[in-house]
Amino acid sequence: MYKGQSGMWSWLFHRVTGLALLLFLFIHIVDISLLGFGPEVYNQGILLFDRVIVRFLSLSLVAAVFYHALNGLRIMLIDFWSKGARYQKALFAIVMVITIVAFVPFAYIIIRPALPGLADWFFHPFASVKAGH
């Protein structure tokens, strides 16, 4: 039994991110199929992706892609490297660290257009004080 160890979490996250990617694929197919209804319908559908909540869902997608891909490599290492099972916990930690480090720049790129005031304050918190505002 795993009982909360890294192997159980790795398995669970891999399944959840796989299902999330499958759901995105279906949404993407529907989104692209809007082209068949003309440019106005497609443009109205695309406007949905500019909403803040959809940007956060896009962030979830980016995190899912990073984790799922890196964990797939971890699984291959465990399966095909004779010492892979011995280093399973360390490999899981490495996957999580790389996922988070790779995710941060994408989070900034995706969120900044939707929340310009918040992003500017977060990265330049004292700019308004210096300007006298």
Image: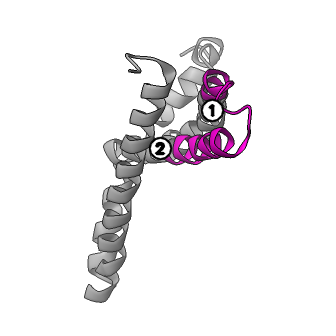
Looking at the picture, tell me which residue is in the foreground, 53 or 114.
Answer: 53
Q: Which residues are magenta?
A: 65-93
Provide the secondary structure element on which disc 2 rests. helix
Q: Position of residue 14 (x, y in %)?
A: 45, 41
Q: Position of residue 45 (x, y in %)?
A: 29, 68
Provide the secondary structure element on which disc 1 rests. helix
Judge from the rendering whether residue 10 lies leftward or rightward of residue 84; answer left or right.
left
- Please give the name of the residue rendered at 60% of the width and 33% of the height, measured from the top-left corner: 104
Compared to residue 109, the image places residue 24 above or below, namely below
Compared to residue 39, the image places residue 69 above or below, namely above
- Please give the name of the residue rendered at 31% of the width and 66% of the height, measured from the top-left corner: 26
Please rate how many residues cluster around mark 2, counting C-alpha atoms within 10 Å: few if below 14, some from 14 to 19, many from 20: many
Q: Is residue 11 magenta?
A: no
Of the 4 image quadrants, the one containing the N terminus is top left
The disc label shown at residue 95, or none: 1
The disc label shown at residue 64, or none: 2
Q: Earlier in the sequence, mark 2 or mark 1?
A: 2
Residue type at the position of mark 2: Ala
Can residue 38 be seen at all in this image of the molecule?
A: no
